[in-house]
Amino acid sequence: MIKICYYYQVAKNIDFIPLAKDSFLAIRKNSLIITPTIISSLILSMFTYKYLGPGITKLAAQQASTQDLTLLKELVEKFVTISFVNFYIQMFVHALTLVMARDVIEKGTFGYLAAIVAVVKKFYSLLFSGTLFGILFVVGAMLLIVPAILVSFFFMFTYVAIIKSDMHSFTAIKESIKLVKHNLNAAFSVYLTLLTSAVTISVVNVLFSRAMESISETNALYNFSNSVLSGILSGLPHEKYERVLNVINNTPSYLAIAITTILIGIVMAFIALMIIKAHDVIKHDDENPAVSEANL
């Protein structure tokens, strides 16, 4: 009973509204924190379009009965390659954003060079934990997505432990699992907040990808976001639905790209700041259970 009350108390201790407000204020004061995500998003989008675009256009022009299996196989191989490149670049950028977020919280500012050096120093720990997470996530996604969600849930503090507590990969993974297990209620609240942020930006990405007419990432989050967007649009009255589609179709591609990449940068910085702040609260209460129980 005391343990249940303790989990509830920790969840109460994480006051998300002030935490979110502080995170947005920090981004506003240190707006350049979003630039690594913006730059990487633009590079990956252009690379994906150039690498896959011509083949997909050619395949789409063929009749279903006469589609070139050799071309299809080549596209699948290219897609796998791009998925690997995309995963590891995003891993590096996320770690870089976490380091900058940590410095903003602790020092009020950050430096690009210092952040890059910090990530390079922890490169092997990040690489190993990221690769293990990727393998488990893909396997989980093949098993009806629920195991993949559990993997991302229990691993969510791994990078923070590597960057903030200077832990090695296995130790960081165990630390993340321990924090989540000991604070399930609070950890779930954090995870739900971060997942909602990711889905929201993915919905925006889906929305503007129609205007950009570009190759979008084919992954579970994208497909889920596409379903959410379709559900929202289908619930609108016909006139408003047509108006929304008209705005989407008439949005210039350069404006759509600019809006999407800036929003992605803001959300990724927000997630980095939120997860570090939430980690600090959960870790503090986990290390001082007597204090938390005394407040019950």
Image (cartoon, rainbow, N blue to C red):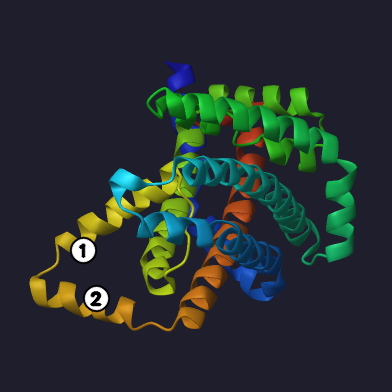
Three-letter amino acid code at the position of disc 1: Leu
Local packing at callout 2 (Cα closer than 10 Å; few below 14, some 14-19, many 20+) is some
Q: What residue lies at 21% left-to-right and 55% top-to-bottom?
A: 231
- The quarter of the rendered structure image containing the N terminus is top left
Q: Where is 263 relative to 273, above or below?
A: below
Q: Is residue 276 left or right of residue 207?
A: right
> Considering only vertical position in the picture, is 225 above or below 33?
above
x and y percentages locating residue 274 in the rendered image: 58, 52
Q: Position of residue 149 (x, y in %)?
A: 46, 32
Residue position marked by numbered label 2 in the rendering: 244
Asked if the residues shown at circle 1 and circle 2 are in contact, with their CB atoms under 8 angstroms apart, the answer is yes
Q: Is residue 33 in view?
A: yes
Q: Earlier in the sequence, mark 1 or mark 2?
A: 1
Apparent side of residue 136 relative to residue 214 in the rendered image (left or right) = right
| Rendered residue at 58%/63% (across/down) | 45
The part of the image, by quadrant, that contains residue 202 is bottom left
Instruction: Sort mark 1 into few (<14), some (14-19) or many (20+) by Cα contacts within 10 Å.
Output: some
Q: Residue furthest front?
A: 66
Q: Give the x, y percent position of residue 181.
A: 55, 22
Find residue 238 and report its image quarter. bottom left
Which residue corresponds to mark 1?
Answer: 233
Q: How far apart are labels 1 and 2 at the CA level?
A: 8 Å
Q: Position of residue 200 (x, y in %)?
A: 41, 57
Task: Judge from the rendering whether residue 23 lies leftward or rightward of residue 231; answer left or right.
Answer: right
Reply above or below: 5 against 261: above
Q: Left or right: where does residue 175 sit relative to residue 123?
A: left
Q: Is residue 22 visible?
A: no
Residue type at mark 2 is Val
